[in-house]
Image: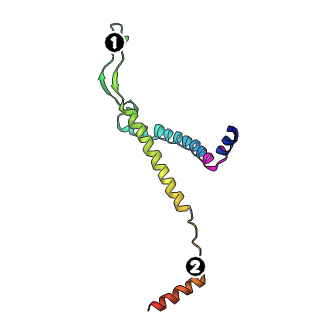
């Protein structure tokens, strides 16, 4: 079996195509949630922090050094934890929305109907129960 034939069989499997569709939709969904966080959630949080964006939160270890002309000689050394917090909020919102979506999907999805028990089996069970008495 040639390499091209094996590749065609691999691609034609339903799981691979489903996975590819899921990755593309997931990437687009991530962009939507990121836009929600950047455009709505973070400005609302910024209103409580006197206009300072969460992504700008940092702990300065060493301030930048300027020469006599005001030109930066050494860059600021800081731990920028605000971006981490913002990314964490993105993740939590994405996980929450996916959870809610799957919960609604599972509620809507109808379970497979159990087949009705044949009458002869019901009759045999009834006879068995009567014999036990």
Mark 2 highlights which residue? 117
Quadrant of the image containing the C terminus: bottom left
The residue depicted at 60 percent of the width and 80 percent of the height is 118
Extreme-front residue of the structure: 1
Q: Are circles 2 and 1 on residues that touch, CB within 8 Å?
A: no
As measured in the structure, the alpha-carbon distance from the residue carrying label 2 to the one carrying label 1 is 86 Å
Specify whether 89 is left or right of 68: right
Write the start and end of the magenta stretch as one range.
Answer: 11-18
Q: Is residue 63 visible?
A: yes
Q: Position of residue 99 (x, y in %)?
A: 47, 52
Q: Tell me the quarter of the picture where residue 2 sits.
A: top right
Extreme-top residue of the structure: 68
Which numbered disc flags the more N-terminal residue, 2 or 1?
Answer: 1
Q: How many marks?
A: 2
Q: Disc number at residue 66?
A: 1
- Using the image, determine if residue 111 lies above or below residue 4: below
- Using the image, determine if residue 42 lies above or below residue 101: above
Residue 60 painted magenta: no
Specify whether 19 is left or right of 12: left
């Amino acid at each position: 079996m040639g390499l091209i034939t094996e590749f065609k069989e691999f691609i034609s499997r339903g799981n691979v195509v489903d996975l590819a569709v899921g990755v593309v939709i997931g990437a687009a969904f991530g962009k939507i949630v990121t836009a929600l966080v950047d455009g709505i959630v973070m400005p609302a949080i910024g209103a409580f922090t006197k206009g300072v964006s969460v992504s700008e939160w940092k702990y300065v270890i060493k301030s930048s050094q300027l020469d006599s002309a005001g030109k930066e000689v050494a860059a600021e050394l800081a731990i920028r934890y605000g971006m981490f917090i913002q990314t964490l909020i993105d993740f939590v919102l994405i996980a929450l929305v996916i959870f809610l979506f799957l919960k609604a999907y599972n509620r809507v999805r109808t379970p497979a109907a159990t087949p009705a028990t044949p009458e002869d089996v019901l009759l045999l069970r009834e006879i068995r129960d009567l014999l036990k008495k």
